[in-house]
Amino acid sequence: MGSRCTARSAGFDPSPLGTLYDPLYFTGGYAIHGNPSVPPYPASHGCVRVPMWVAPMLYRTVPYGETVYVY
């Protein structure tokens, strides 16, 4: 079962754990967001990091309310 994209913020968005780039927020305040460091292993407290160059494309194509599936 997926979660819904509950909020979006264009550009850099400060958060308690650091600044997020083009975040797409979903359940519990977690977000899919751009980050300069995207290791090939789980290294987050819940967010989904994507390369900085991917974040703007996701922001343009994932609308508010879209279902988000994280595997």
Image: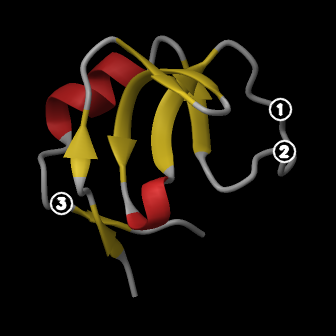
Real-space Cα separation, disc 2 to disc 3, in angstroms: 25 Å
**Nearer-N-terminus badge (3/1):** 1
**Nearer-N-terminus badge (2/3):** 2
Given the image, on which type of amino acid does mark 3 rest? Answer: Glu
- What quarter of the picture does the C terminus occupy? bottom right
* Residue holding disc 2: 43
Q: For residue 59, which quarter of the picture? A: top left
Looking at the image, which is closer to me, 40 or 20? 20
8 to 18, vertically: above or below: below
Q: SS of the residue at dot 3?
A: loop
Name the front one of labels 1 and 2. Answer: 2
Q: How is the image coloured?
A: secondary structure
* Residue holding disc 1: 39
Task: Specify few, some or many for label 3: CA neighbours under 10 Å numbering under 14, 14-19, or 20 or more.
Answer: some
Q: Are marks 1 and 2 in contact (CB under 8 Å)?
A: yes
49 to 29, vertically: above or below: above
Q: SS of the residue at dot 2?
A: loop
* Residue holding disc 3: 66
2 to 11, vertically: above or below: below
